[in-house]
Image (cartoon, rainbow, N blue to C red):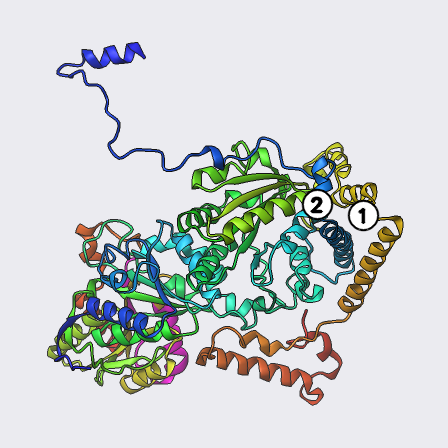
Amino acid sequence: MTTTAVKPATMASALQRALRDAMAEDPTVHVLGEDVGTLGGVFRITDGLAAEFGDERCTDTPLAEAGILGTAVGMAMYGLRPVVEMQFDAFAYPSFEQLISHVAKMRNRTRGAMPLPITVRVPYGGGIGGVEHHSDSSEAYYMATAGLHVVTPATVDDAYGMLRAAIASDDPVVFLEPKRLYWSKAQWSPDEPAAVEPIGRAVVRRRGTSATLITYGPSVPVCLEAAEAARAEGWDLEVVDLRSLVPFDDETVAASVRRTGRAVVVHESTGFGGPGGEIAARVTERCFHHLEAPVLRVAGFDIPYPPPMLEKHHLPGVDRVLDAVARLQWETES
Amino acid sequence: MKKSSTSVQELPGAAVRRPTPPPAWQPRTDPAPLLPDPEPFRVLGTPAAAGADPALLLRLYTELVRGRRYNTQATALTKQGRLAVYPSSTGQEACEVAAALVLEDRDWLFPSYRDTLAAVARGLDPVQALTLLRGDWHTGYDPHEHRVAPLSTPLATQLPHAVGLAHAARLKGDDVVALALVGDGGTSEGDFHEALNFAAVWRAPVVFLVQNNGFAISVPLAKQSAAPSLAHKAVGYGMPGRLVDGNDAIAVHTVLAEAVDRARRGEGPTLVEAVTYRMDAHTNADDATRYREDAEVQAWRAHDPVKLMERELLERGVLDEDGVRKAAEGAEAMAARLRERMNADPELDPMDLFTHVYAEQTTQLAEQAALLRAELEASADPASGDAGSTGGEAAGERR
């Protein structure tokens, strides 16, 4: 195999390459969803797959999310590895009964006799100017369902490596794709992709000493930018990219917070009942005596996702993260 | 009509234009061959029964007698607290038995929660088939062993599974057919529509059998669907709909056999509506007298699937009184074995709670498993607690 020079690649192209490589290596991998064939998906993630592997391996389905996921269950029962595309976050909701009552539980219901190796790809989150129902961050719903893995890449390397791992997993994986990072670029070689941490492990994206920003998916670049900006204020921030929400890497997160003594959880989805509450509780349970301040959350407001002209006010940006970091100086508030 | 066209002409600036049909429109398929017959197909009591294979008739009869006895035995087990609940299929045995016997070994059955009998008639261990309803595990059998999917409690959600499995089998080049069972209430669910649509578009080798037993718990069909019949729903998806007398085992078997053959030939799915009646309540927890008249129940009692078959076989000389007695004795022996086995408490390992959630246990579940193990060990150790009260109170022994 000739080596392609490392050059800028987008997350979208890395995801596309992951699907292509998985299909080439394993004939049981099938892609299905609305518009995934001829069109190549509305985000072009499946572009070229139908042409290369045929429309029986990359199938345009009728427009019916429960049917897409429900038929994928039957396909998995017969030994295939379906990779399902839900076109947008909020379009996945009709499939929730299949996901929760069957996909998440089939291994358990059958005492391990019928595992379902299904990957459910969900482009999620805001920041692309999408209209209503195109920008939801639905990870809390998935996290609340035992039996699912819930992962979300934030880098081009992870997009490739984690999607390959998700497809190879013998368990169902909800693969959340931060759609506003689809066009983010990094130096990447499709022929020699970098090895990444396996699913289930968090990664420290930036070392720091004065506080930890715990984040994932679309908020990772925001937190890295905030960490750079915070240097001017004398803060040396550590940034932990969770990568996997289920299972949760308590070890990496707790080790970081014990080093820094302070933590802020940053995500786009609503704060109330959102992932941040669970993460803050886990950190507090493990690091209470190391904490110099309460674990804070910077989240989207507790509102239905706003119209695109207002989303910039809703999404947690660098300034809101820095405000929270400033509030970590807890001793000044007594 | 005339008035409205005049009013269009009167609009200022409106030109008179003859509407043209949309350029691409044409009927996709001729609906006539897809339409069900107006009357449910019947064989028993008609001259057609003379052509039926006596061996198949006897086999269906034996399974019907066993099935009826199975239903009464399982219902009795609920009264003894041995089953948490039992949704009886008494009155619907012809559908259950025909569904099981029409399939080849390599085919798959996708039952709903009321279809334990179909699973047992397909060869499942009766006790394993009842674990869901006893409450010791959700699915007591390996679905691959007899190619019976887990009994599905959510309504109609198993139908897209049947479509996906049949589709996958065909992609692999296997001539496998999936038969999916659903009730009349289930035809209102979105998954029913999505499954039929996918099956028709993909020409998947699937057969859908709707057991229309008149009620979805208490809601009668008239409040469930405004369609001429449930079989008519097939036409809108582009597949044939077939209507059959669901208490006529040979008729159900005949119609299903045709549909299965059609699927196996690659000609696509069929929707079969079997018109039948649930003689018992929805489950033992339901009071059917609140929503239906006794006269209706009595009218259906006269159309009992077991009696219909027995009368036919006796009249044709395929069966005699000795055969009737032997079938009853066989069913009684099955019931006695079932009773005996169900009267033993299942041995449960509480640690199984954590065993089959993921392929590899997560750190979080490993921690929770350790907690439960410690609780179990503490309750098993008489020195560690109040010896007098450990029994019923102990974690892990709660039922």
Pointer 2 local density, CA inside 10 Å: few below 14, some 14–19, many at least 20: some
Question: Which chain is indicated by disc 2?
Answer: B
Q: Is residue A133 magenta?
A: no
Residue bearing the label numbered 1: B318
Label 1 amino acid? Val
Query: Which corner quadrant holds the C terminus of chain B?
Result: bottom right
Query: Which corner quadrant holds the N terminus of chain B?
Result: top left
Under circle 1, the secondary element is loop
Task: State the separation of the CA atoms marked 2 and 1.
Answer: 11 Å
Upstream in sequence: badge 2 or badge 1: 2
Q: Which residues are magenta?
A: A276-301
Label 2 amino acid? Ala
Under circle 2, the secondary element is loop
User: B164 or B112: which is nearer to us?
Assistant: B164
Q: Position of residue B205 (x, y in %)?
A: 48, 53
Q: Is residue A243 visible?
A: no
- Asked whether, in this view, residue A192 is left or right of residue A109, the answer is left
Q: Is residue A236 visible?
A: yes
Q: Position of residue B257 (x, y in %)?
A: 60, 49
Residue bearing the label numbered 2: B52
Q: Which of the 4 image quadrants contains residue B272?
A: top right
Q: Is residue A281 magenta?
A: yes
Which label belongs to residue B136? none
- Asked whether, in this view, residue B110 is left or right of residue B59, the answer is left
Query: What residue is rendered at 61% in x and 32% in y?
Result: B39
Query: What residue is rendered at 66% in x and 75% in y?
Result: B348
Pointer 1 local density, CA inside 10 Å: few below 14, some 14–19, many at least 20: some
| Most distant residue in the bottom direction | B383
Q: Position of residue B99 (x, y in %)?
A: 63, 52
- Asked whether, in this view, residue A54 is left or right of residue B339, the answer is left
Q: State whether residue B237 is above or below residue A275.
A: above
